[in-house]
Amino acid sequence: MGKFLKLTALVAATCCLILAATVGQTQQPNPIIAQPMAAQFVPPKVESNPRLITPQELQRQFTLVGALGRPANEIMTLDIEIVDFLKGESGNVVHVWKINGQALQQPVRIDYSIWRHAIGVPKMVKNQLYEVRAFEDIRYDSGLPTEAYVENNVPVPQAGGWGFRSNLNIIRVLR
């Protein structure tokens, strides 16, 4: 039951953050939202009586906004640069410099992958700028509850955990 409460608290807290961040938002990226993300997720504090919500209810009531400050799965034209990854990142990381022609105040660092149905995407090299068409997906990683490790006398890993994760999917390289 503890894992379920943590999960629902995270979903509820994330929804509140999304709502607060998107109130009065225009179609342009919000520079307050489009900030570099920390490499590791820190879950919010669990409220004593969080509201329970199903994934279907979450989808009906809210629009998830990714690290770029845009709705999940929105196709965008981006100026990106392949960069070195840091500890805790996937190994495929870019800096996003522009979204749909709008320069960001500072680049957004995000994991990326080549969309599985993309055809003809050239090998991209580090420290070079590319203009790409891409979308950001948001996944929920439930991780494993600490109790599972404790009950089996297994050391609890320090990294990782549960939470939402953003990933940029490159569908085409324009230049």
Image (cartoon, rainbow, N blue to C red):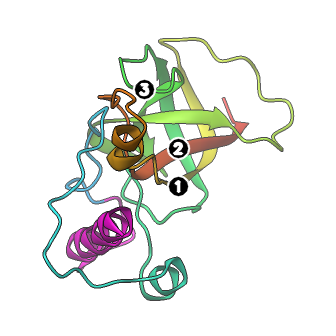
- Name the quarter where the N terminus is drawn: bottom left
**Three-letter amino acid code at disc 2?**
Asn
Q: Position of residue 40 (x, y in %)?
A: 30, 35
Nearer-the-camera pick, 148 or 56: 148
Q: Which residue is mark 2?
A: 167
Residue at 55% across, 43% down? 168
Residue at 48% across, 81% down? 54
Q: Residues within 10 Å of mark 3 (few under 14, many from 20)?
A: some
**Residue 162 drawn above or below residue 125:** below
Mark pair 1, 2: CA separation? 8 Å
Magenta region: 1-29
Nearer-the-camera pick, 99 or 123: 123
Q: Position of residue 53 (x, y in %)?
A: 40, 83
Q: Which residue is mark 1?
A: 139
- Between disc 1 and disc 3, whose residue precedes? 3
Q: Which mark is residue 89?
A: 3
Q: Are marks 1 and 2 in contact (CB under 8 Å)?
A: yes
Q: In terms of secondary structure, where does tag 3 sit? A: loop
**Residue 147 drawn above or below residue 72:** above
Residue at 57% across, 62% down? 74
- Looking at the rendered image, the disc whose residue lies closer to the viewer, 2 or 3, is 3
Nearer-the-camera pick, 119 or 45: 45
The quarter of the displayed image where residue 115 is located: top right
Is 67 displayed left or right of 38 in the figure? right
